[in-house]
Structures are given as C-alpha cells and as structure tokens.
Image (cartoon, rainbow, N blue to C red):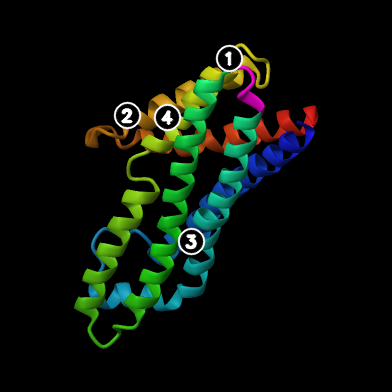
C-alpha cells in the first residue's frame, strides 16, 4: 500500500498546486488584462484573446488537464487504500472521482480548442464573440459551473475514511463542509458557494497529500 500512498500524496499536492497556479495567474495576469469583464465589445474580446493566447493556453492546460491527471491518480490511490475498510463507499468514490476527472479534462480540451477556433475568426469579431461565448459556457458547465461530481466524491471519501484511520477525522469533516458547499451550487442563487468549494479544496488536497506522504 505504500505505493498507493505515495501516488496519492503526489496527486493531492499537484492538485493543490494547480489550483494555486490558476488563482495566481487569474489575479496577477488575466483579470488585470480584462478577463471576465462584464460586457466587452467583440473587438475588445478578440484583442484580449489574441494578446493572452499563450497565457490562456497554459492556464487551461494546467488548471484542467494537469489537474485531471493528478486527480485521477489521487482518486485511484484513495480507493485502493479505503476499499478494505469500506468497499461500497470506496467504489462510489472511485466512480464519481473519475467522472469528475473526466469532466475537468474535457473542459480543458474544449477551452483550448475553442480558443484556437475563436481566434481563427478574426475577420468577423461578432461571430468570434458568439463562438467564444458558447465555448466558455460549455467549459464552465463541465469544469465548475456546478460542483456535483467533486462534491459527491469528497463526501464519499470522507464517509469511507471516517472509521478506517486512513485520513484524519478532522480532514474528513472538512471534506463534508466542502462537499456541502459544492452541492449548494446546484441552486443558481447559491453559486457563490463554489468559491468556498474551490478555495477549500486547495487546503483539502494539500492536507491529503501531506498525510499520505508522511504515512508512506
């Protein structure tokens, strides 16, 4: 089981690092350049996408694709560690964890392909703006508009680990809080809880990584 602990530790720490990377790039580079502004003109949008294409491509690659690979490794490792103690819940966690990883990777692939396709329509800013709106809507739907898969996964992990000693109970309880906040994003007026979900997962991933690394 030491191999699974090491694999899970690396996966958890990489997931935490990708979240931190995403926030840092968003706050220091993308938002100051106009990312997420309320109603940019099609011309302003194209200018922004053209100027930030390289940054956006790397950003999407890290926060989605790299995160998904690390997440899958963590999901499989935790399932292997928890299965002897809670076979049904660990299998449930495996299913929802891999679903989440698949959705996250799909969001990143769509975002990067959509970015390149949008920038191929520079001669028609209005058409490019409509295409980018569709791309970001699909990307958001897969990658974080509703945090159902990730919420069910972390709750299932917490329940499976509660009495096994694989993870500390305080960590499991924190996972329940994160999962509860993620489930609230089903309701449009409560989408702000998605911020708690995302920020909380930075600590959760890092905490899991450290626990598994120490015990490996």
Of all residues, the one furthest to the top in this rendering is: 163
User: Residue 166 location, x and y as percent?
Assistant: 68, 21
Between the residue at mark 2 and the residue at mark 1, the CA separation in whole angstroms equals 23 Å
Binning the other alpha carbons within 10 Å of mark 3 as few (below 14), some (14 to 19) or many (20 upward) gives many
Q: Which residue is mark 3?
A: 60
Binning the other alpha carbons within 10 Å of mark 4 as few (below 14), some (14 to 19) or many (20 upward) gives many
Q: Secondary structure at mark 4?
A: helix
Between the residue at mark 4 and the residue at mark 1, the CA separation in whole angstroms equals 15 Å
Q: Which residue is mark 4?
A: 152
Q: Which mark is residue 162?
A: 1
- Comes first in the chain, label 4 or label 1: 4
Q: Which mark is residue 184?
A: 2
Between the residue at mark 3 and the residue at mark 4, the CA separation in whole angstroms equals 24 Å
In-image side of 130 versus 73 (left or right): left
Between the residue at mark 1 and the residue at mark 3, the CA separation in whole angstroms equals 34 Å
Task: Identify the residue shown where x is 46% and y is 62%.
Answer: 30
Binning the other alpha carbons within 10 Å of mark 2 as few (below 14), some (14 to 19) or many (20 upward) gives many
Q: Secondary structure at mark 1?
A: loop
Look at discs 1 and 3 and give the one toward the viewer: 1
């Amino acid at each position: 089981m030491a191999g699974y602990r090491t694999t899970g530790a690396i996966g958890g720490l990489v997931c935490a690092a990708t979240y931190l990377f995403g926030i840092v790039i968003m706050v220091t580079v993308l938002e100051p350049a106009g990312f997420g502004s309320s109603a940019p003109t099609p011309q302003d949008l194209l200018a922004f996408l053209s100027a930030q294409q390289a940054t956006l491509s790397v950003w999407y690659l890290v926060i989605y694709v790299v995160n998904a690979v690390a997440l899958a490794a963590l999901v499989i490792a935790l399932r292997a560690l928890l299965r002897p103690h809670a076979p049904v819940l660990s299998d449930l966690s495996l299913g929802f964890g891999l679903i989440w990883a698949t959705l996250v990777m799909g969001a990143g692939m769509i975002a990067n392909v959509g970015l390149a396709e949008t920038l191929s329509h520079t001669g028609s800013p209005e058409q490019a703006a409509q295409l980018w709106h569709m791309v970001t809507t699909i990307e958001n739907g897969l990658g974080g508009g509703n945090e159902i898969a990730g919420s069910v996964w972390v709750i299932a992990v917490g329940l499976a680990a509660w009495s096994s000693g694989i993870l500390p109970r305080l960590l499991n309880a924190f996972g329940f809080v994160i999962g509860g906040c993620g489930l609230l994003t089903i309701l449009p007026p409560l989408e702000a809880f998605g911020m708690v979900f995302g920020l909380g997962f930075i600590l959760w991933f890092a905490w899991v990584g450290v626990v598994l690394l120490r015990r490996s």
